[in-house]
Image (tube, grey):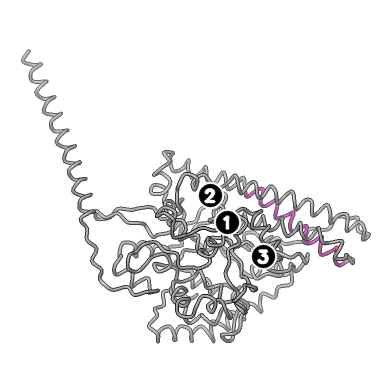
Amino acid sequence: MEKKHRMRNWLLFVVTVLVVFLLGLLASSIVERRAETAYVFKPQVKIGPHEPRNSVWGKNFPREYQSYLLTSDTTFRSKYNGSAMIDMLGVDPRLVVLWAGYSFSKDYNQGRGHYYAVTDNINILRTGGPTGPDDGPMPTTCWTCKSPDVPRIMNRDGITEFYRGRWARLGPEIVNPIGCADCHDPVTMNLVITRPALIEAFERRGMNITMATYQQMRSLVCAQCHVEYYFDKNRPGAEGAEYLTFPWDKGFSAESIEDYYDAYQFEDWTHALSRAPMLKAQHPGYEVFMTGVHAQRGVSCADCHMPYRSEGGQKFTDHHIQSPLNNIAASCQVCHREEALQLVSDVYNRQDQIIRNRDRLEELLVRAHVEAKLAWDLGATEKMMKDVLKDIRHAQWRWDYAASSHGGSFHSPVEISRVIGSAIAIAQEARLKLARVLSTLGHNEEVPYPDISTKAKAQAFIGLDMDKLREEKRQFKQNILPGWLEEARQREAGWEVTIR
């Protein structure tokens, strides 16, 4: 009896200790949460309108700024992408032929973090080697998504005026990489849209972007740039400008945007081999994301790419914008209970399956361009080639829409698979029509597939003089770039980029 009494006392003691411990944890949690709500923000500096320097914002928001600086880290590499710079033409030389006659055939790299937005724009061969502010192949519009200096200049000069002129004209003024002022109001810190093209696209669809919820804004600030767009050279009232425009008037799907471009008779370039009037997809990440299950469940871009963090009792948004595969615990496993290895395996499995079909489509398109060139060389007429060129245009547009959508095979694998499948069917139809044209012209043999096993061979095949292009860029860095840097220093504009 006495023994049972002692055991009961010990049990009561253990239970009491456990309850006290749990109450202590609860009290600690309550105190921590109260500390969060009791936190009073005390700005260290006054942030003026259109302040482009991220380091200035960082004085008031050190946690966010320190996490943003981590976008300079380029060590993460997933199976296909990541934050490392990847020479995509070297990985897949077929791209050189697909973009023959367009600047992407010169140089195309997998993008690094936002920290390098200005640096990579300056270094890329596509921006050429201008000798003065009115030279160079690219318009000033190409700066639009690269820097918080852009809304500052737009506010000063006007939107249309910003879109006028060549790329080098604004080089000395655009020096700060993507950052705080691109997405935040400097007084309230509310998320804001700073690029007019998104607002204008909503207005043309009869939608008011100011009515967007906070959760919607956590995707819409990304949609300012991670979208399909084109440069409208015929906008009424904007003569002489290449006005940035989102082609959403008919819808967001690949087919809807294709219909928009066809009705507008728009083309980005004429293909150097097939002479097809081509479309170059930019990066329709937002359009594809909105067709996927995550968007349908109310998940925003920031939920996965900028998840919340807690530090020192304070909850804040992690501004180390990166692949969720490098931050699985904070991104994926907040909702998914699978092990990290299983989640990664699921992503890679979807990517593998889609990329196999995408590679097949690329081969069909290369063959179509090469066969079309032969048809022209043999004397084909515009009438004979009209339907062929339309099919090549549509098939490659859908390939590019899928290939350039930044994570599309994860964001919406069903939609991307559908788009690639339809493109394969159109490309095959184009080749059947070409076979008939070639037969009519007396050619009934298989057209040899070119040796494009390397980037260098592919660029030589389409007639690019890469030595000349690299020398032009070298001369630009030697003769023009130092002046840009000096002008920026004199204006005390800050220079947060490194030039390799």
Query: How packed is label 1: few (under 14 Cα within 10 Å), some, or many (20 or more)?
Result: many
Residue at 57 percent of width and 49 percent of height: 409
The reply, left or right, for residue 427 in relation to residue 83 is right
Magenta span main SS: helix
Quadrant of the image occupied by residue 204: bottom right
Q: Are marks 1 and 2 in contact (CB under 8 Å)?
A: yes
Query: How packed is label 3: few (under 14 Cα within 10 Å), some, or many (20 or more)?
Result: many
Query: How packed is label 2: few (under 14 Cα within 10 Å), some, or many (20 or more)?
Result: many
Q: Are marks 2 and 3 in contact (CB under 8 Å)?
A: no
Judging from the image, what secondary structure is the residue with disc 2 in? helix
Residue at 41 percent of width and 52 percent of height: 215
Amino acid type, mark 1: Ser
Q: Which numbered disc, 1 or 2, marks the residue that appears first in the sequence? A: 1
Amino acid type, mark 2: His
The reply, left or right, for residue 443 in relation to residue 129 is right
Judging from the image, what secondary structure is the residue with disc 1 in? loop
Residue toward you, 77 or 361: 361
Highlighted range, magenta:
355-377
Q: Disc 2 or disc 3, which is closer to the eye?
A: 2
In which quadrant of the rendered image does the N terminus lie?
top left
Is 18 inside the magenta-drawn segment?
Answer: no
Q: Residue 392: x, y in percent?
A: 75, 58
Residue found at the far top of this picture: 1
Q: Which residue is mark 2?
A: 411
Q: Disc 3 or disc 1, which is closer to the eye?
A: 1
Q: Which residue is mark 1?
A: 405
